[in-house]
Image (cartoon, rainbow, N blue to C red):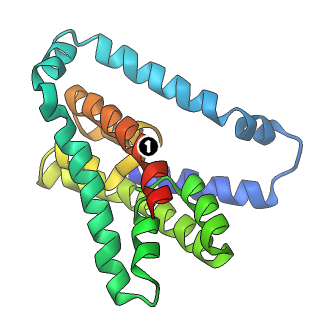
């Protein structure tokens, strides 16, 4: 699945660069949100078929926030530590890491705040987080545990990396992954604005 995801990414880039304009590609780009909604709907059906999962999530109560809290704190601390080794101000390093994989928003916002150079850094570093998640999730699922798979995905755990969660973890982890993605996505603009 990782190889298929990588091939799809490379194929998409090549088709975007060299493919004919005005084709179905334009329609896919315009309606990409609907494709993600279809993915979420399919995951919802999968979760709904397993009756005991939602009840188990209700049993977590406040503990359900532990994973998103850890992902947020880990991302911010990671950005702070990384900035110590790079020639960028600490607050900008934290702002880049605060994107938690949401490269489209982070790149644009930081380009407006700090210039095109920092916007490019934010875009590429968050894109790399998402791409590396595709490679890390299968290994983490095999060698650590399912819940740990959510951490590298960050805010993308509810959309683009969700297919990896579905493939390599169980339904309960998929529900936690969606919840984590919702929380992290809500926090990203707040953290970046704070920075």
Residue at 58%, 75% in the rendered image? 118
Q: Secondary structure at mark 1?
A: helix
Q: Residue at x 73, y 54 (%)?
A: 15
Quarter holding residue 17: bottom right
* Nearest the eye: 43 or 79: 79
**Picture quarter with the C terminus:** bottom left
Q: Of residues 90 and 64, which is closer to you in this image? A: 90
Depicted 87 relative to depicted 108: above or below: below
Q: Is residue 90 above or below residue 105?
A: below
Relative side of 14 to 107, left or right: right
- The residue wearing badge 1 is 185
Q: Is residue 106 visible?
A: yes
Residue in the foreground of this view, choosing between 194 and 63 = 194
Of residues 143 and 185, which is closer to you in this image? Answer: 185
Which x, y percent locates residue 3? 44, 55
In the rendered structure, the answer to whether residue 160 lies left or right of residue 73 reads right
List x then y, in percent, for residue 113. 62, 67
Q: Position of residue 92 (x, y in %)?
A: 47, 74
């Amino acid at each position: 699945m990782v190889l298929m995801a990588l091939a799809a990414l490379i194929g998409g880039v090549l088709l975007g660069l060299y493919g004919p304009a005005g084709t179905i590609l334009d329609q896919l780009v315009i309606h990409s949100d609907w494709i993600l909604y279809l993915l979420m709907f399919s995951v919802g059906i999968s979760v709904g078929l397993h009756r005991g999962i939602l009840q188990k999530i209700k049993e977590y109560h406040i503990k359900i926030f532990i994973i998103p809290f850890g992902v947020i704190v880990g991302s911010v601390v990671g950005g702070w530590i990384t900035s110590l080794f790079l020639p960028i101000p600490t607050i900008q390093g934290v702002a880049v890491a605060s994107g938690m994989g949401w490269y489209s928003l982070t790149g644009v916002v930081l380009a407006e705040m700090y210039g095109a150079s920092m916007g490019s850094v934010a875009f590429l570093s968050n894109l790399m987080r998402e791409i590396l998640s595709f490679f890390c999730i299968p290994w983490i699922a095999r060698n650590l545990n399912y819940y740990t798979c959510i951490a590298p995905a960050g805010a993308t755990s509810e959309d683009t990396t969700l297919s990896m969660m579905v493939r390599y973890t169980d339904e309960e982890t998929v529900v936690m992954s969606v919840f984590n993605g919702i929380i992290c996505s809500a926090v990203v603009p707040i953290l970046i604005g704070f920075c």
